């Protein structure tokens, strides 16, 4: 698929064109180039995003990363930064957006990002977070409080009861 068709696919998924979507689109193009990535049918490609903005939609469309598959993870720091991992090769890269020129309107910002080459938009750095393990499947238990099924990793014991995080009252003598 050519880049124009990929862009149109991203726009269709996201719902509109915007600068934020362009950021994710360009980050994905750069990650594809740097790490020799292809669309991830399972968890071959992993993205850890440091924001939850519009660009995430382009990453989902172009690289096949999604929260449901477990290969799109959020390490929210409010930064336009994305760590990409190729499980097949073991290579990874962290792309951090460079500052744009000051005083741009929303429209001029969109045009600027559309015209930029990915290498001019992002600083390439080493990843700072180790490649996460593949997603796990957890046994579920019914919460003795609300009756809803909850993954074992999120169950807490309170006496002889198994409680989900919403029903469990934590104990902390320092933050009373």
Image (spheres, helix red, strand yellow):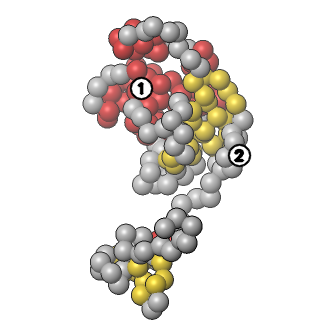
Q: Nearer the viewer, residue 25 or 49?
A: 49
**Residue 102 x, y percent position in the rendering:** 50, 9
Q: Residue at x 69, y 49 (%)?
A: 130
Determine whether the residue tagged by mark 1 lies in a helix, strand or loop.
Answer: helix
Using a 10 Å C-alpha cutoff, classify the residue at mark 2 as few (fewer than 14 neighbours), some (14 to 19) or many (20 or more): few
Q: Nearer the viewer, residue 174 or 65?
A: 174
Name the residue rendered at 51%, 35% in the picture.
78
Residue 135's disc is none
Q: Earlier in the sequence, mark 2 or mark 1?
A: 1
Q: Percent from the top left, x then y, of residue 22? A: 43, 23
Is residue 51 positioned above or below 110 on the image? below
Residue 7, can we see it?
A: yes
Asked whether the viewer can see residue 152, the reply is no
Residue 73 is left or right of residue 150, and the answer is right
Seen in the picture, residue 144 relative to 34 is either above or below; the reply is below
Q: Residues within 10 Å of mark 1 (few under 14, many from 20)?
A: some
Name the element at disc 2: loop
Q: Is residue 1 above or below residue 111?
A: below
Residue occupying image coordinates x 31% and y 35%: 13
The image position of residue 24, as x and y in percent, is 47, 29
The residue sitting at 42% across, 87% down in the picture is 161
Residue 55 x, y percent position in the rendering: 44, 31
Image-quadrant location for residue 147:
bottom left
Q: Which quadrant of the rendered structure holds the N terminus?
A: top left
- The circle on residue 20 is 1
**Label 2 to label 1: alpha-carbon separation:** 28 Å
**Disc number for residue 90:** 2
């Amino acid at each position: 698929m050519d880049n124009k068709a990929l862009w149109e696919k991203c726009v269709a998924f996201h719902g509109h064109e915007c600068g934020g979507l362009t950021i994710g689109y360009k980050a994905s193009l750069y990650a594809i180039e740097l790490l020799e990535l292809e669309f991830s049918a399972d968890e071959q490609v992993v993205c850890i995003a440091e924001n939850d903005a519009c660009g995430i939609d382009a990453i989902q469309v172009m690289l096949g990363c999604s929260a449901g598959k477990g290969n799109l993870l959020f390490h929210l720091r409010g930064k336009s930064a994305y760590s990409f991992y190729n499980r097949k090769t073991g290579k990874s890269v962290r792309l951090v957006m460079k500052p744009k020129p000051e005083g741009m309107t929303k429209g001029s910002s969109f045009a600027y990002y559309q015209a930029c080459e990915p290498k001019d938009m992002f600083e390439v750095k080493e990843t700072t977070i180790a490649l996460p393990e593949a997603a796990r499947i957890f046994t579920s238990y019914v919460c003795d409080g609300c009756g809803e099924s909850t993954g074992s990793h999120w169950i807490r014991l309170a006496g002889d009861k198994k409680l989900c995080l919403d029903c469990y009252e934590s104990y902390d003598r320092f933050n009373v």
